[in-house]
C-alpha cells in the first residue's frame, strides 16, 4: 500500500517538475525509513497529498515535502521525530509542523522532509476548559493544532475567553505561540505568549516534555516565540477570563500624526481605558476615502457626510469597550469620558455595537469577501515591523507619503504596546524601549506586473527596511522572513547565544522548522 503510494508520489513529483513548482526531489533511499512498518501510528503518513502543504498564505514560496504526517496522537508526532533523529545527521530528512499554513515565506514547509499537519492532531488531545474557582484562574488546555476560532467557540460555552488575541482567528495555537500573537489587547495583557501557563512539547529528539514557568522552564520560555526551533507544541494551557457579550467598536480619524500617537499612548498607559486599541494609516491621494468606516454609524451623520480627506494622510484610531446587556449605560458614560480626552477630527466619530464573537472574528468576514472575488489566494508580500516609540515620528515622516504614496494594496496597521507586558525570558525579539509600535504593511499582490505586483510591494518593503537601517530606527522585524543565519544573528543580537544554546539542547540535529532558515540541518557547533 505504502509502496504504491510512493510510486504515485514519484509520478506526482515528475508532473510538478514539468509544472514548474519550486521543489526538491528526495531519492528513494531518503524515503525508505518511512516505509511500511517503520512507524506505528494512530494516524497515518501519506505521500499523495504533499502538494497541498507545499504552499502558504504568502503564496511566494513552494517546497515539496516527502510525506505528510496526519497525527492521530501526540505519540505519533514523537515517533516520527524520534525516527528522523535516529537516522542521524547524514539523513537530510527534516520535520515541519504546519498549523494552518498562514506563514508568509515557507516557514511551515520543508523541502523533501515530513510536514506534520497539526490540525489533524486527535486522539486524547481534545480541548478541555477548566472554570477555575476563587483560588485558581480559569484556563483551557488546547491542542497545538487547534484554530483560535475553535478555542473561542469552546470557551464561550463556559462564558469564558482567552485574554489576548490576533486580529484573525483562523490561525493555530502552536503557530501564533511560536511567533508571539499580537493584537489590540496586547497593551494590557501582553501578546498571546504572555498568557500561557503550560506547554506540552515534542522536542527535536522525539521526547514529550511538559513545561511551564516552574517545570522545564528553559524549554517553556524558549518555545514561546521560538519559531518552532525547539519543539512541536502539542498542547497549550491558555489563561481565560470572563467573556463579555457585546463590544462597542469605535473608529475616529486624525490628520496629525503627533496627536494620533499621543492619544494612542495615553490610552494604553491609562488605568481606566478601552479594552482593545489599534490604529491604521490611510494614504489616498485621490481624496476618496476607502472602506475604513464600512458598517459603522457616524455619531453626527450630517457633519460626517461633509468630511473629505483632501488627499491627506489620515490615521484611524480604533478602539473597543466590552459590555454586557445590563451595563450599556455605564459603557456609554465611560466611552464618553475617554473620547472627550482625545483630539480626533470631531466629525469622524463612527461606532457600532457587535457581539464579542463578531468583533473577534471580524477579519474572517473580509476573508470570505476576498475569497469570493478570488483575491485571498494571491501573493502576500507582508512586512511587519516593531518600531521604538523614540523613532516612530522619524519613521512615519519618511514612510507615509514619501516612500508610500498610497495604501491601496492593503491595510497599514500602526499601534503601540507596552514592553512591560512582554516576558524577556521568551525567544521573541522586541525593541529595547518601554513603548514600541507594531507597524504592519499587509499588502496583497494580485497582478503580475505594475502597482499590484509582488515586485512593486517588495521594492517598497525594501525601501522601508533600508531606511530603518540607515536612519538607525532601532527596528526589529516580526514574522521575519530572513534567509541566512547571518541575518538571524543580527536579528537576535545579544540573545543569539541563548537561542543557539537552546537549539543545541532541544533539537541538536536541527530537524525542526527548517523553513525558518535559521539552522541548516546538523550545522550546529558540537562544542556548545
Ligand atoms: P504556520 O504558518 O503553519 O506555522 C508558523 C511557524 O510555526 C512555522 O515555522 C511552523 O513550522 C511553526 N509551527 C506551527 N505549528 C507549530 C506547533 N504546534 N509547534 C511548534 N511550531 C509550530 N499574527 C499576529 O501576531 N497578530 C495578528 O493580528 C495576525 N494576523 C494575521 C492575519 C492573517 C490574515 C494572517 C494570514 C496571519 C496573521 N498573523 C498575525 C500571523 C500569524 O501569527 C502567523 O501567520 C503564524 O504563522 C500563524 O499561522 P499558522 O497557525 O497557520 O502557523
Image: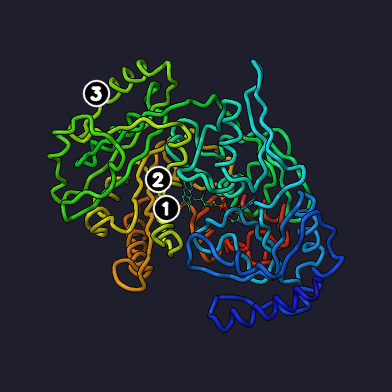
Residue 70 image point, x, y percent: 71, 57
Q: Is mark 1 within 8 Å of ligand 1?
A: yes
Q: Earlier in the sequence, mark 3 or mark 1?
A: 3
Label 2 with label 1: CB-CB less than 8 Å: yes
For residue 302, side relative to residue 314 (left or right): left
Within 10 Å of disc 3 (Cα), the crowding (few <14, some 14-19, many 20+) is few
- Between the C-alphas of marks 3 and 1, the distance is 32 Å
Residue under pointer 3: 340
Q: Position of residue 41 (x, y in %)?
A: 82, 57
First of labels 2, 3 by sequence position: 3
Ligand 1 has an atom within 8 Å of the beta carbon of the residue at disc 2: no
| Residue assigned mark 1 | 384
Q: CA distance from mark 2 to mark 1?
A: 7 Å
Q: Give the vertical position of 128 relative to 174 (above or below).
A: above
Q: Find out whether the residues at labels 2 and 3 contact each other: C-beta distance under 8 Å.
A: no
Q: Quadrant of residue 451?
A: bottom left
Give the mark nearest the N terminus, 2 or 1: 1
**Helix, strand, or loop for circle 2?**
strand
Q: Which mark is residue 438?
A: 2
Amino acid at each position: 500500500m505504502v509502496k504504491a503510494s510512493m510510486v504515485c508520489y514519484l509520478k506526482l513529483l515528475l508532473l510538478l517538475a514539468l509544472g514548474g513548482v519550486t521543489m526538491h526531489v528526495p531519492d528513494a533511499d531518503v524515503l525508505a525509513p518511512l516505509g511500511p512498518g517503520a512507524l506505528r501510528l494512530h494516524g497515518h503518513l501519506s505521500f499523495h497529498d504533499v502538494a497541498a502543504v507545499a504552499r502558504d498564505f504568502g503564496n511566494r514560496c513552494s517546497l515539496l515535502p516527502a510525506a505528510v504526517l496526519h497525527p492521530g496522537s501526540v505519540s505519533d508526532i514523537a515517533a516520527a521525530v524520534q525516527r528522523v533523529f535516529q537516522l542521524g545527521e547524514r539523513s537530510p530528512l527534516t520535520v515541519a509542523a504546519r498549523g494552518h499554513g498562514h506563514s508568509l515565506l515557507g516557514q511551515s514547509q520543508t523541502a523533501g522532509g515530513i510536514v506534520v499537519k497539526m490540525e489533524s492532531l486527535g486522539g486524547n488531545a481534545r480541548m478541555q476548559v477548566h472554570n477555575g474557582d476563587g483560588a485558581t484562574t480559569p484556563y483551557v488546555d488546547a491542542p497545538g493544532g487547534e484554530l483560535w476560532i475553535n478555542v473561542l467557540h469552546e470557551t464561550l460555552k463556559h462564558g469564558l475567553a482567552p485574554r489576548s488575541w490576533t486580529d484573525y482567528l483562523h490561525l493555530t495555537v502552536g503557530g501564533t505561540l511560536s511567533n508571539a500573537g499580537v493584537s489590540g489587547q496586547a497593551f494590557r495583557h501582553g501578546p498571546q505568549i504572555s498568557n500561557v501557563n503550560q506547554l506540552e512539547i515534542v522536542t527535536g529528539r522525539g521526547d514529550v516534555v511538559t513545561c511551564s514557568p516552574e517545570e522545564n522552564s528553559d524549554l517553556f520560555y524558549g518555545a514561546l516565540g521560538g519559531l518552532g526551533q525547539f519543539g512541536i507544541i502539542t498542547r497549550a494551557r491558555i489563561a481565560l477570563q470572563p467573556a463579555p457579550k457585546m463590544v462597542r467598536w469605535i473608529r475616529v480619524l486624525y490628520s496629525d500624526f503627533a496627536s494620533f500617537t499621543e492619544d494612542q499612548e495615553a490610552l494604553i498607559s491609562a488605568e481606566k481605558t478601552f479594552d482593545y486599541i489599534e490604529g491604521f494609516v490611510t494614504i489616498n491621494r485621490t481624496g476618496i476615502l476607502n472602506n475604513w468606516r464600512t458598517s459603522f454609524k457616524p455619531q453626527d451623520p450630517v457633519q460626517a457626510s461633509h468630511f473629505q480627506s483632501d488627499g491627506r494622510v489620515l490615521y484611524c484610531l480604533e478602539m473597543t469597550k466590552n459590555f454586557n446587556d445590563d451595563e450599556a449605560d455605564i459603557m456609554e458614560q465611560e466611552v464618553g469620558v475617554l473620547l472627550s480626552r482625545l483630539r480626533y477630527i470631531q466629525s469622524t466619530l463612527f461606532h457600532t455595537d457587535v457581539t464579542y464573537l463578531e468583533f473577534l472574528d471580524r477579519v474572517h468576514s473580509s476573508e470570505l469577501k476576498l475569497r469570493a472575488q478570488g483575491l485571498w489566494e494571491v501573493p502576500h508580500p507582508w512586512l511587519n515591523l516593531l518600531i521604538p516609540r523614540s523613532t516612530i515620528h522619524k519613521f512615519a515622516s519618511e514612510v507615509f507619503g514619501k516612500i508610500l504614496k498610497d495604501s491601496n494594496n492593503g491595510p497599514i496597521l500602526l499601534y503601540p504596546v507596552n514592553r512591560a507586558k512582554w516576558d524577556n525570558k521568551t525567544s521573541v525579539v522586541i525593541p529595547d524601549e518601554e513603548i514600541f509600535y507594531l507597524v504592519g504593511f499587509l499588502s496583497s499582490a494580485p497582478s503580475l506586473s505594475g502597482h499590484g505586483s509582488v515586485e512593486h510591494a517588495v521594492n517598497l518593503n525594501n525601501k522601508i527596511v533600508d531606511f530603518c537601517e540607515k536612519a538607525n530606527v532601532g527596528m526589529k522585524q516580526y514574522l521575519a522572513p530572513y534567509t541566512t543565519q547571518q541575518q538571524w544573528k543580527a536579528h537576535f543580537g545579544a540573545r543569539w547565544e541563548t537561542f543557539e544554546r537552546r537549539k543545541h539542547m532541544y533539537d541538536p540535529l536541527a530537524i525542526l522548522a527548517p523553513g525558518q532558515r535559521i539552522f541548516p540541518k546538523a550545522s550546529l557547533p558540537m562544542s556548545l
